[in-house]
Image (cartoon, rainbow, N blue to C red):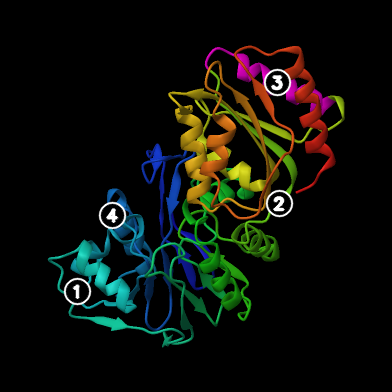
Amino acid sequence: MIEKVTSTILNIGVNDKKIDLFEGQYEVKNGISYNSYLIEDDKITIMDTVDKNFTDEWLSNIDEALHNRMPSYLIVSHMEPDHSASILALVKKYPNIIVVGNMKIFQMIGQFFPNLILTNQLIVKENDQLNLGRHILKFIFAPMVHWPEVMVTYDELDHVLFSADAFGKFGTLDTNENWVDEARRYYIGIVGKYGLPVQSLLKKAMLLNIQTICPLHGSVLKENLNQYLGLYDKWSKYAPEEDGIVICYSSVYGHTKEAVLALVEALKSENYNNVKIYDLARCDQALAISEAFRYTKLVLASITYNGDLFPYMNQFISGLVERDYQNRKVAIIENGSWAPLVSKKIKEKLANCKNLTFCENEVKIKSALSITNYEEIKTLAAELINNTN
């Protein structure tokens, strides 16, 4: 996989179509790419490496791109192993290459490669520049997007931002899919907790004349950059993208699910159709979480289970809290045959989330739905429709 980014920049990364779970938890039905870039200049420079399972393929791509020339620099932006695992192999093959990184990056290189002694290294600081001949690279630190050592690199010649894990997405480069959906799922799952650091990086990026973004996962971005920057601004401010309702439920014998379906019908009867439903025991929870961040309103429907919430609901809410869920309206459907605790437990678990508004109306089921419950559902639907977050 070698693709031209500009006349002098190549993507020499690889596609991983064998992986089933990224970071051991995120479903990637269309795989993922590990991007690495090569800048052709007086001093040939390689930007990051790839996962250890693809070292040989990546080295072959480098050989093809070099045409018997020698690389001068390896720039390390991020030490997560899917991007750094092939550092040792590259240094062994090209022992004169100079490894470029910040102090924290070299500290982590020592941790991941305790037997690697780097004799050629260049430690850079914020806003330092590196002259390759025609290309001048500027290093911009981006701590906690989403590891503490992360830095991005701006090429002043081609106006390219090498953005590390920022602006990445799931899916291989030859997958035809909607960028926004998979980038959102990637961002919320992996970067979502770090809104303030992302905002800090965006402020630095706004000072640059960026015409191309080269992330370490997913497509190179060249057109409609304002759209991508705008989405990152919204996501990192925890602002909804659009009005809509996400309903997440856990049901064992079908009564809670019946309430959810009744709520959907009540909403439809009022011509409100922007509703997404997720059975938390069966869905991709990473997708459900990303959708909860996408829309303005969230309905949580659960049974009481062992004096707490049903395990899948607990898992889902933990995922929201971990990613600083905020600025939304939340509704609750509770089902408890003898110890109804759902509403109490949900509010306790979400207590530290900022700017959540709970609907005044709740549905309180005791075992099966009653006539009163159906009236409660209609009242809740009206509140969800008539009140914006």
Element marked by disc 4: helix
The answer to whether residue 6 is visible is yes
Instruction: Sort mark 1 into few (<14), some (14-19) or many (20+) by Cα contacts within 10 Å.
Output: few
Callout 2 crowding tier (Cα within 10 Å): few <14, some 14–19, many ≥20: some
**Residue 172 spot, x, y in % from top left:** 48, 46
Q: In this view, does 108 lie above or below 295?
A: below
Q: Mark 3 points at which residue?
A: 261
Q: Nearer the viewer, residue 183 or 68?
A: 183
Question: Mark 4 highlights which residue?
Answer: 55
Name the mark nearer the viewer: 3 or 2: 3
Amino acid type shown at disc 4: Thr
Magenta segment includes 260: yes
- Mark 4 or mark 1: whose residue is earlier in sequence: 4
- Main secondary structure of the magenta stretch: helix
Which circle's residue, 3 or 2, is located before the other in the chain? 2
**Residue behind mark 2:** 241
Name the residue that disc number 1 marks: 95
**Contact (Cβ within 8 Å) of mark 1 with mark 3:** no
Q: Element type at marker 1?
A: loop
